[in-house]
Image: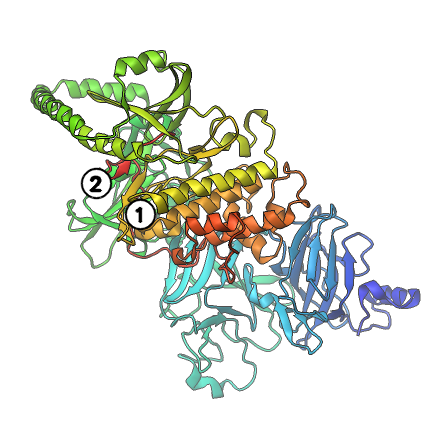
Amino acid sequence: MLPQMAFTSNIFSFVALLLCFSFSVNPQPLNHPTAIAPSSWTNSPSFQLAFTFNGGETIRSILFRHTAMDEVSFGTGFYCFPPCKSFYLSIYIIYSTYHELAYFLPPQVIWSANRAHPVSENATLQLTSKDGLTLHDSDGSLVWSTSVMNRSVAGINITEAGNLVLYDINNSTIWQSFDHPTDCLVMGQTLAGGMRIIANSSSTDLAESQFYLTLLADGLFGFVNSNPPMVYYYDPTSFGYSNSYQVYNDTSNKTANKTAFMQLMDGYLGMFSTLSNDSAIIFRTLPAKSIQYMRLESDGHLKLYDCDGYEWKMVDDLLSMDSDMDSYFPKLSNCDYPTFCGHYGICNNGQCTCPTGTSGNYFKPVDDRRAELGCYAVTNITCQDVKNHRLLKLNDVSYFNNVDNVAFDATDEQTCKNACLRNCSCKGALFQSSNGNLSYGKCLTLSEVFSLKNYQPEGTNLTSSAFIKVQVSSSKVGLDAILGSTFGALLFVLTLICIYFACLRKREEAQDEDIMEQLPGMPNRFTFEELRIATENFVKILGKGGFGTVFEGTWGDGKIAVKRLDNIGHGKKDFLTEVETIGNIHHINLVRLIGFCADKLNRILVYEYMCNGSLDQWIYCKDGRVPLDWPMRFKIITDIAKGLCYLHEECMQKIVHFDIKPENILLDEKFHAKVSDFGLSKLIDRDISRVMTKMRGTPGYLAPEWLTAMVTEKVDVYSFGVVVMEILSGRRNLDYSQIEGNLHLIKLLEEKSKSNTLLDLIDKNLGDVELYKKEIVNVIELSMWCLQWDSTRRPSMLMVVKVLEGAMEVATSLDYNFVSSIPLIANIPSVVDQSAPFPASVLSGPR
């Protein structure tokens, strides 16, 4: 047994060891599979057991296990791709003999601890009894650690199967890498229910990509992580969480297993549903000396690799039609993979083209010589010019996975198209129906357009059309208007419509005056002319919200905030009823309504002026503002909680805000925080536990139960949890300026909670973290309680206030899977309709 690297007994044995590795003189076994606690390793060129392969790959081995199969070895240590400027703590398969490595064959990385954060030279790995393994970068920052649940670690071991194991003094397993797969599975490793294997971004970038494979209650699923995640592979032949998919190598008595498998032929096993031990097998058996593993690739393919002693080869593409596995299992063609033709590309029998229309080409290939890279829009779609959005219709075109495999709305074609046009975040829509029936079918709206494909149903009467959103030029729109104006009949119809609505409006105005007299306790009523003068003709903009623009104005000796509502779809009666409701809400942490204007078609709300603007200008350090200290941030968090608690618990009717985000939190001159913008709110009777409503709010702050459209006030609690993490971290939840892997703050929180490194998320501009460490951690844990996937496990806002005031503790046994715990494939609405008219219970408020 080779001694521990950090504790080599003397210089003579070290020199002999190097001679053994370099020249195979008096060879000794290349084997050091264990280390005991405490131990420490520093990543540096002076690493005692370092090997550089012909391709430039370098390993600095901490543990090395030579297995019973002569050519198979597993190692764990620091690994780098050429030019070796950053390193991953990895487990790798190495082709070797008992005495030396095959330098012409690079190691194959099968697991990595720090996928999203490669470390530099002089990074350290420590093994301690208390913390298990901890990885620190050269600057001392914690990158990764194991969770040992207060158990004492005696040592680590790399097994013959390639499993990195932490064990205690009784040799019982405390932690193992097999329970935390990355992008690969090896012989003997099990993918249990709920686990994921997530593809790397590329062959040299081990950060997580958008593809993942997981075993759920009703089968094996392949997802592409869009918003929401979409299924591209589904195998229903597994039977629930009790099953598992694993790599299996039977080198003993194959005949004895005959009744345990669904099929056995020629000494090979395929992908089977069940065994006597309730497992499902994904690998076929090979001879005893085979080196075999499978990897989920960055393009969504699940590939099987083997080594013949001269090179690593892909021997099977397990999910694809050309796989050697039995055809009983679902298979994908090239066109079924989400990125086969890139974004917007249309796949037809493995060939990729860009969408075209009769009125012009709106898309061009990214690279004329490489059609598989996809297409780009000739004119970028912008939300500032929604009037020029159009839908390009593509007949006989469907999505990479067909509408059948994803959530859809049952509706007509025109409603499907309008849902996409009204929502700026929608990039396209799909409509599928029987016999070309446009009045009833399946609608799917897309926030991101992956590969499309020509739809050629076999033996069905289904038809499918795709509608891709494009931006047309203003001149093109003008030409269309000119052509349309030539139709005299249309002008005649429009004239009749105008006359009708003019008469209707006069009648409504006469009725509205009666309504005003019947509503007691109304706030001040302004005329439009008064507000036009107060705002100097609506010039100085304070901000824009989902339903209008806020202007600064002056009334008497003070300033006011005037919100002019746009296209809210309200009649005057509904609007006045809402004004009465808002006017009766009074709380120090809610922005106060001063008055309103309901003059003809004008709908205007007048609010108290908040001189320090919205919270986002302070926590993201906009305009060079001085960062807020911890006491100020804690005070703001508490103010928000009290405002929401009042809406949920103390009003006559429960009020759900639906759009809690930093832009809707305003600050006065003393930095008191007040909740604003009730533009999406809804009144709920207190004897009703849940309400059905269309999805509304802002991406990044939406609770997962929006996918069912059955919501409670707990959606506000989830959004509050997101806002709290933004205040603590000083960054947005969805921040596309971050490196890949750190884009999603709540996903990062999920990872840090599992590695017990929560303080890594704290804003670097926040001073005296150590002074307030206990209080900060408590608030982070409170936010995680609010972010529970199951809404019934979240606290009420009253409980949140009690925790912040120290009268209550955060719940224990939290679920740390904040981002996704279930497949998003149920029959749930997929259209986020933020611009449709709302019922009378909707409250329109400030920005």
Quadrant the C terminus occupies: top left
Q: Is residue 592 left or right of residue 302?
A: left
Amino acid tagged 2: Thr
Colour approach in the figure: rainbow
Position of residue 390 relative to residue 774, above or below, is above
Q: Is residue 512 rendered to the left or right of residue 425?
A: left
Q: Residues within 10 Å of mark 1 (few under 14, many from 20)?
A: many
Of label 2 and label 1, which has the lower sequence position?
2
Identify the residue position indicated by label 1 in the image: 830
Q: Name the residue under label 2.
A: 415
Locate residue 556, reporting x and y percent: 38, 14
Question: Considering depth in this image, is 358 or 527 the residue closer to the camera?
Answer: 527
Q: Judge by depth and name the residue closer to the eye, 665 or 396.
A: 665
- 689 relative to 524, above or below: below
State the image quarter where residue 161 is shown. Answer: bottom right
Residue 644 at x, y percent in the picture: 40, 42
The x and y percentages for residue 417 are: 24, 39
| Residue under the point 35% across and 48% down | 713
On screen, 424 above or below 31?
A: above
Disc 1 marks a residue whose amino acid type is: Ser
Q: Can residue 250 be seen in this view?
A: yes
Label 2 to label 1, Cα distance in Å? 13 Å
Helix or strand or loop: what does disc 2 sit on? Answer: helix
Image: 776 above or below 274:
above
Q: Nearest the camera: 795 or 430?
A: 795
Q: Residue at x 77, y 58 (%)?
A: 41
Q: Mark 2 packing: few (<14 Cα in 10 Å), some, or many (20+)? A: few
